[in-house]
Image (cartoon, helix red, strand yellow):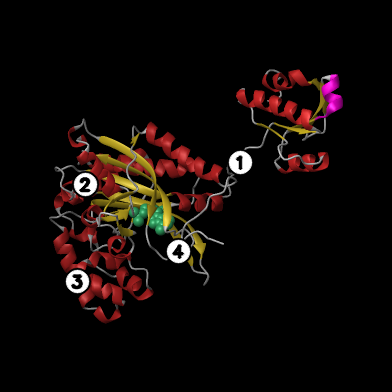
Amino acid sequence: MIIKPRGTMDIMPEDTPLWQYVENKAREISSLYGFGEIRFPTFEQTELFARGVGDTTDVVQKEMYTFFDKDNRSMTLRPEGTASIARSIVENGRCSDAMPLKLYYLISCFRYEKPASGRYREFYQYGVEMYGSESACSDASVIALADAYVKALGISDYSLEINSIGCKECRPAYKKALTEYYMSNYDVLCDTCKGRLKTNPLRILDCKCPQCAALAKDAPKTLDFLCEGCRDHMQTVQDSLEEMGVAYKVDTGIVRGLDYYTKTVFEIIGPGEPDKDGNVRRLALGGGGRYDGLVQEIGGPKLPGVGFAMGLSRLIIALQMSGIELPKKPAPVLYIASLGKNAQTKALSVVQKLRLDGIYAESDLVGRSLKAQMKYADKIKAEYTAIIGDDEIEKGKAILRNMNNGEQTEVEISALAEFFTKGGIK
Ligand code: AMP
């Protein structure tokens, strides 16, 4: 048997209503905040991610699905959406549009990570990007949208955590202090972080291994190194969130794994799940921040941006843990059981009429016995059933049974569809 690649998922029809629920809410809320949908290629030239995401990041160094096409060009399945969108707006001449440019996307992404609960190699993201505003109010507005989305889904057990990682001006001093701190603890670092110390010391703060995580607690904090502009920016983000009534915490440990961030970074952390050792691991539902240098980095004009991406599978895990009533595959209003060829055709024509009138109905298509058909009607949770056989066709009437209370009504077969569309049974 051929099986799916590790870390990918098949989503079956009984589960898709949940996915559609998070996707539809994403579409609704994006429109409400004035964001238009953008679609872009699943693969791009590898160079885009090396330059945009940053070639010292884990995503670029270890996690990309890169291949050579038949013309020997290096291509990569998108590991995220932001770099592609920056490329797309430059290529499509949108950098001189009326600003802000507000875009959202629902995409699959590909990262070669070790699969675990909530971590896949092909996963799905809802993201938004706002370009063309340096104002801290645009950070606050994007953060408020992320918060409103999670709330609108019905997830209440989460926290919004924000930080600032400074800009080109103030980050070098912070990096220096961080490097000095970690140099003095060099022997404690894991081998990966020993390498990161030379290439990108900020990444060490993200390391999950216990000794590095313990060291991170006492590491210098970005907030102590911000220049005046970045400090003001962070303060305005906080003031605006407070004014809007968006609850948040400042967490100096948040640095985000991608290189393009400047100033504001934030994450939405969901409910915890115990791992196999019983330690509660809280999943990041989403994260984002400001990226003022990204468009220039990939060859475009100076254009500030801010945005976020949420992981749909993680939102679904959080929803399932929240205990709220979740959408299910819809059940048919009517199931028509039939006996014999003529009756099967008759049943199909009634069902077709109902469907054209916007009512979900089913009839037998596989030639089951009457008993098996009634069992099937029960299984698919049909609200009503009707049985049509030669006798019923001759009389032109069938018995309609309410499956919830057992009530039975005789109905003209020719009026069966109208019974639902006009009779108020709906
Ligand atoms: P990132 O840009 O890496 O912070 O990703 C944004 C969000 O996407 C994360 O907070 C997760 O919810 C989700 N995400 C990232 N990587 C994965 C993955 N491998 N599997 C499932 N979801 C992921």
| Residue 391 drawn above or below residue 3 | above
State the residue at coordinates (70%, 29%). Answer: 348
Q: Main secondary structure of the magenta part?
A: helix
Q: Which residue is mark 4?
A: 115
- Check the picture and name the quadrant holding the C terminus: top right
**Label 3 near label 2: C-beta < 8 Å?**
no
Looking at marks 4 and 3 on the same chain, the residue that comes earlier in the sequence is marked by 4
Q: Position of residue 379 (x, y in %)?
A: 72, 44
Q: Position of residue 360 (x, y in %)?
A: 64, 31
What amino acid does circle 2 point to? Answer: His
Q: Is mark 4 within 8 Å of ligand 1?
A: yes
For mark 1, does the 10 Å Cα neighbourhood hold few (<14), some (14 to 19), or many (20 or more) residues? few
Residue closest to the far front: 70
Looking at marks 1 and 3 on the same chain, the residue that comes earlier in the sequence is marked by 3
Q: Give the residues drawn in magenta, as a range.
A: 388-395
Magenta stretch holds residue 389: yes
What amino acid does circle 3 point to? Answer: Lys
Q: Which residue is mark 3?
A: 198
State the residue at coordinates (20%, 31%). Answer: 97
